[in-house]
Image (cartoon, rainbow, N blue to C red):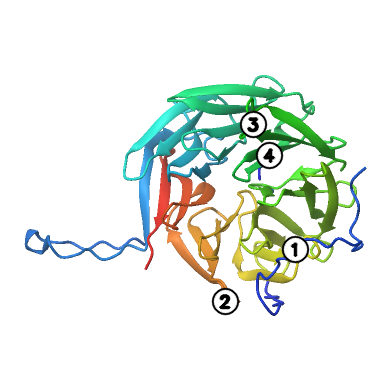
Amino acid sequence: MLSPLSGCSCEEAFDSEWDLEDRWPTEDVGQRDIFDEDIFEEDISEDDADIDEPIIPWEPEEVEPDIPYGHALTDRTSLAVDPAGTLWLGYHSCNDASCSAPMLRVMHKKVEQDWVGEDITIHEGIFGISVIHTDEPIIAYPDSFDPVYRVSMRTGDAQWQAHDFPVPRSAQLRYDGFDITQNGESYFISFAPYDALQVSLYGLDTTAAAAQWQPLRPLEIENSRAAMERGLRADNDGSVYLVNYSGETGIYGVYRYDSELDRWPQSVELESYTDFFVHSLVITRNFGLCMSGNYQNINVPYGDSLMVTCGSIYDLTTDVKIFGDEPLSSEHPSSIIEGHDGTLYVAFNPPGNRELRVASRQPNSQEWTVETVYDGPSYGISTAIDLSGDLVISFYTCNEANLCSLKVLWETPD
């Protein structure tokens, strides 16, 4: 998802967790029809060189060091993994202390190889990466000079081909949002310009002989607002799910697009949690819809708690967890993702961004654990699951001299 800019623990379990195989009924279910997203170290002597080193639970890797600090720099990172296991990482790089010409840059790391970087364009603000085919990611972003939304697709080694969308931008460009996703065959991208009367949707079928971006039926919703990180997700059954804030009701909801019908036949809103600001959405392997974000909670010192809610297109709040003792930085999005084994992970920053934490819950469990995985400043987090099934987190960290570095944090299995 992508956009511009407490004390209780409430849970309700259902009998067979994540058992949501029946995605939507054929009969009318009363949904709103809207037809018309501390590392420890151990010194090892030469004599002990043959002894296996202990497993390091979380291993940070520096991707690019000593980047001068700038606003565009710490806005965001974006991670994706292609079928060959190559990790694709988008970020902003600066070449002077004032970050006068921030560069949108993509790093990639093939399995057991070094990082390689490619420049895209001078840019600041939001962006997002997605990938279907090996070595051919796409990166979407609002252009910083022209009032257009743009996608650049990698067509070869350090070669990128740009495509502009005929979607009118608002007068308040910095508040325009978008989201991007894929289902293994097609890309989908939604655009939510500030104060627009609808959310535009486009699709690209990569299996077509002459693949081109095609306009799909827009979502008729006024004054919408995209999620902060990943608010658009697609399943393998022809549906696309979009998290959006409705200016009409003032509530976040999830809207389902049916690609076969080219319409939006279902929606459901978070009517019981109107103070929930959605950051990120994931479709679980059992077809559940889970979201993370900040819940405005007057019972905690900072007023915002991490919240995770899971459910379906009928009810988004079947299973709710409000982390009353985990205050959340409201200025930087959390990122939710599901591991290969069904474990849910939520990476987030507490207020002040002085550390990076991960909340996780194993499948068939109601118990959440929270651990600090990086003790230091962190900004612009994004998550992915690598080929081996490990959680990977990208982020920036900056020191008192306003020098930052781009890091990737790897989870090492027990």
Real-space CA distance between mark 1 and mark 3, rounded to the nearest whole angstrom: 31 Å
At 78% from the left edge and 51% from the top edge, which residue is drawn? 256
Contact? badges 2 and 1 (CB < 8 Å): no
Q: Amino acid at mark 2?
A: Glu
Q: Residue furthest bottom?
A: 15
Residue 316 appears at what percent x and percent y?
A: 76, 63
- Asked whether disc 1 touches disc 3, contact meaning CB atoms under 8 Å apart, the reply is no
Question: Is 283 displayed left or right of 361 in the figure?
Answer: right
Q: Is residue 4 visible to us here?
A: no
Q: Residue at x 84, y 36 (%)?
A: 195
According to the image, label 2 marks what residue? 367
Q: CA distance from mark 1 to mark 4?
A: 21 Å
Q: Which mark is residue 188?
A: 4
Pointer 1: what residue?
Answer: 312
Mark 2 or mark 3, which has the lower sequence index?
Answer: 3
Return the x and y of residue 390 as percentages of the image width and height. 44, 57
What kind of residue is marked 4? Phe
Of marks 2 and 1, which one's residue comes earlier in the chain?
1
Which of the marked residues, 1 or 4, is nearer the chain's N terminus? 4
The reply to whether residue 142 is visible in this rendering is yes
Between disc 3 and disc 4, whose residue precedes?
Answer: 4
Q: Which residue is mark 3?
A: 208
Question: How many residues crowd mark 2 within 10 Å: few (<14), some (14–19), many (20+)?
Answer: few
Q: Secondary structure at mark 3?
A: loop
Q: Amino acid at mark 3?
A: Ala
Q: Quadrant of residue 30?
A: bottom right
Sequence-first tag of 1 and 3: 3
- The quadrant of the image that shows the C terminus is bottom left
